[in-house]
Image (tube, helix red, strand yellow):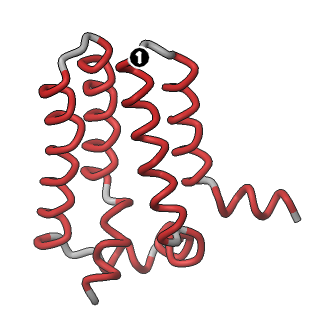
């Protein structure tokens, strides 16, 4: 498996999903309280460390062969991945300024990116 494939398929590993979601929730709370350094460390460091460990150490072949792996290959383009990151950053930024609609909007963008293939199918 190439490094590019490992970077793609690690995104659906349960530990990666848990790290991303839980870190975002905790970081949003910390940023809401204006704990900038703690919020950024919690929001960025655990997901990066988990990504690094999974990409380097985990056999991702079963994820590549799965239905979700096929979905990622087809719909999780670099642009969609960048939009997911942008959505997360919107939520973090909005939490600093106490804008609940911005937090929800950021998470909605992340959810829309994950469901991009489904949304495209409905649009047809």
Q: Position of residue 66 (x, y in %)?
A: 46, 73
Q: Is residue 69 above or below residue 34?
A: below
Q: Which residue is mark 1?
A: 97
In the rendered view, would you say 74 is above or below 86? below
Horizontal relation, residue 81 to residue 54: left or right: right
Under tag 1, what secondary structure?
Answer: loop
For image coordinates 55% across by 26% down, the residue present is 104
Q: For the point 76% across and 62% down, which residue is it? A: 120
The crowd level at tag 1 (other Cα within 10 Å; few <14, some 14-19, many 20+) is some
Number of numbered labels in the structure image: 1
Q: Position of residue 65 (x, y in %)?
A: 43, 80
* Extreme residue in the bottom direction: 2
Image position of 3 (left or right of 90): left
State the residue in front, 72 or 28.
28
10 sits to left or right of 68? left
Residue at 49% across, 43% down? 87
Instruction: Please tell me which residue lies in front, 40 or 56.
Output: 40
Tell me where residue 39 sits by quadrant: top left
The residue sitting at the right extreme is 124
Q: Residue 98: name its quadrant.
A: top left
Residue at 46% x, 61% y is 81
Q: Position of residue 49 (x, y in %)?
A: 12, 54
- In the rendered image, which quarter contains the C terminus? bottom right
Asked if 15 appears above or below 81 in the picture, the reply is above
Q: Quadrant of residue 116?
A: bottom right
Residue furthest to the front in view is 97
- Where the N terminus falls, by quadrant? bottom left
Query: Which percent across, then down, holds residue 24?
Result: 32, 33
């Amino acid at each position: 498996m190439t490094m590019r494939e490992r970077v793609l398929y690690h995104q659906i590993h349960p530990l990666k999903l848990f790290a991303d979601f839980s870190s975002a929730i905790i970081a949003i709370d910390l940023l809401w309280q204006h704990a900038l350094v703690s919020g950024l460390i919690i929001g960025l460091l655990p997901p990066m460390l988990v990504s690094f460990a999974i990409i380097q150490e985990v056999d991702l072949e079963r994820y590549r062969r799965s239905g979700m792996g096929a979905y990622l290959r087809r719909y999780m383009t670099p642009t969609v991945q960048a939009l997911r990151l942008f959505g997360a950053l919107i939520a973090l930024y909005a939490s600093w300024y106490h804008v609940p609609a911005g937090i929800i909007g950021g998470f909605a963008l992340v959810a829309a990116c994950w469901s991009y293939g489904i949304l495209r199918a409905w649009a047809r």
